[in-house]
Amino acid sequence: MTTSNIKANPLGAALCEKKWARWTALALLASAMFFAYIFVDILSPLQELLQEQRGWDPVAYGHFAGSEPFLNVFVFFLIFAGIILDKMGVRFTAVLSGAVMVAGGSLNYYAVTQGFQDSAVAVFLTENLNLPSAWWNVTPFYAGMPASAKLAAIGFMIFGCGAEMAGITVSRGIVKWFKGKEMALAMGVEMAIARVGVAVVVVGAPVIASIVPVEVSRPVAYAVLLLIIGLICFITYGFMDKKLDSQGVQEEKDDPFRVRDIGKILRLPIFWLVALLCVLYYSAIFPFQKYAINMLQCNLQFSAKDAGLVFFIFPLGAAAVTPFLGHYLDKYGKGATMLIFGAVLMILCHLTFAFIVPATQSVIVTLTAVVVLGISFALVPAALWPSVPKLIDEKLIGSAYALIFWIQNIGLYAFPMIIGSVLVASNPGVTDPMKYNYTVPMCVFASCGVAALLLGFALKALDAKKGYGLEKPNHVADDAEKELIGAAESMEE
Ligand SMILES: C[C@H](N)C(=O)N[C@@H](CCCCN)C(=O)O
């Protein structure tokens, strides 16, 4: 199915053949993603301070937090990002995405500063964007939303365009540098570094904010600074990418782009299996993360700080395991089996949070479930993203990643709201946020896992029938490919 980017280089070994060079390229790409993931969650541990200093109640915070995928989902920005990536290549799109993240992040920062509160923009926003809370209002804006939350949401949705564009670009960049080598390991390392970013934020943001004078915008300022460093990483990567192109190892570009190419991807049953598995699995992970601290507080009667410490293990556990699983995939394959196993672990953990944790209030059981969920969150991403190049023609890989991200973003947009409504509906009359019963919402997350598991079985069956090589190691698949290319080249000679 795939075409290879490995071409004969008359000038000697290409840069991607040198280990130090491809790992340096990865370090640059992964650093930019690390900073992006830090920004995504920078305000999550500061909800109390946002309420005290900026008047954001939980509703305002929820609408701000949910705004990130808005432009990607409803204005189809991610689809355009995929087309840009396939037409313009990794170098251009990486720098563009870095610049968009800095622009959106800066706006978000300005919105939470004291300076904004007294500005004319604040007066304007207080009077505008007061949309009714009706079913058709899919925007994050509602009547009475604080002006700072409105502008922060606008900034965050612009940032979201850059962050998701960067996500697909980095994946394609890794394919470009690592195809036929340690590709899954490289993707695993990149995702592990991103998870460490989430863990750093949980602990770091409150510490930075509480330096006297206590100021909620300070951690955001640091995070914007990191986004600027991320942009510099992308620009530096651009020089390496240009050198690689000049050595004849160019990525295949879709030139001219045809809309029917997107149709080609959408007609592949295997694409739908992967995309639906992705949206179901991630909808039970990222939206769960938003409720996890409160769920632990309610079940264990912990403070937010202690619950945060328990949950801190989740991204760290995933970070520790993901590169090893990537290495395993490179060496031994079993991608589809890893997806199935990851879904099973997720179901078990969510059911534990639904029934066993509330009944036993056991910290050991909770910690075990958090660790096992971390392993699941290593298994699925480590197998999912490196499998895409096995299924889709290389020149369409940017669009394919973008389409998968777009479908995934629909779930990431909808699920926090669905879970919020389920939580309220299953706890009639409960107003104390420490008294919620999370059994029904956790069962909803577990059912996503069951659906993902069924898709995992279907994927494995289709792979066995059509021979995509999902269960094969990357090296073996690519060695065979190299042999074919070598044979073709000798025939040309
Ligand atoms: C949220 C984002 N769309 C996503 O799916 N992130 C994945 C990583 C995708 C690969 C990025 N190069 C994740 O597991 O965090």
Image: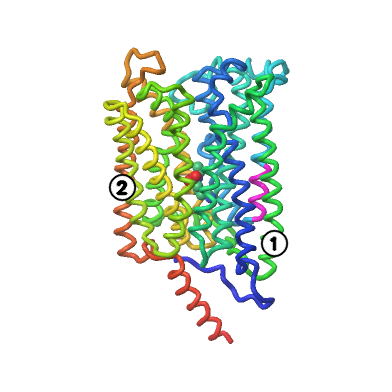
Image: magenta residue range: 91-99
Is there CB contact under 8 Å for labels 2 and 1? no
Q: Position of residue 485 (x, y in %)?
A: 52, 77
Q: How is the image coloured?
A: rainbow
Residue drawn at point x = 42 percent, y = 38 percent: 285
Magenta stretch: residue 479 in it?
A: no
Query: Hey, which quadrant is residue 125 in on the image?
Result: top right
Lateral position of residue 340 relative to residue 206, left or right: left
Mark 2 lies on residue: 453
Secondary element type, mark 1: helix
Q: Position of residue 250 (x, y in %)?
A: 62, 66
Using the rendered image of the protein, determine whether residue 64 is visible from the camera's viewpoint: yes
Q: Label 1: how many residues lie within 10 Å, few (<14), some (14-19) or many (20+)?
A: some
Secondary element type, mark 2: helix
Mark 1 lies on residue: 242
Using the rendered image of the protein, determine whether residue 162 is visible from the camera's viewpoint: no
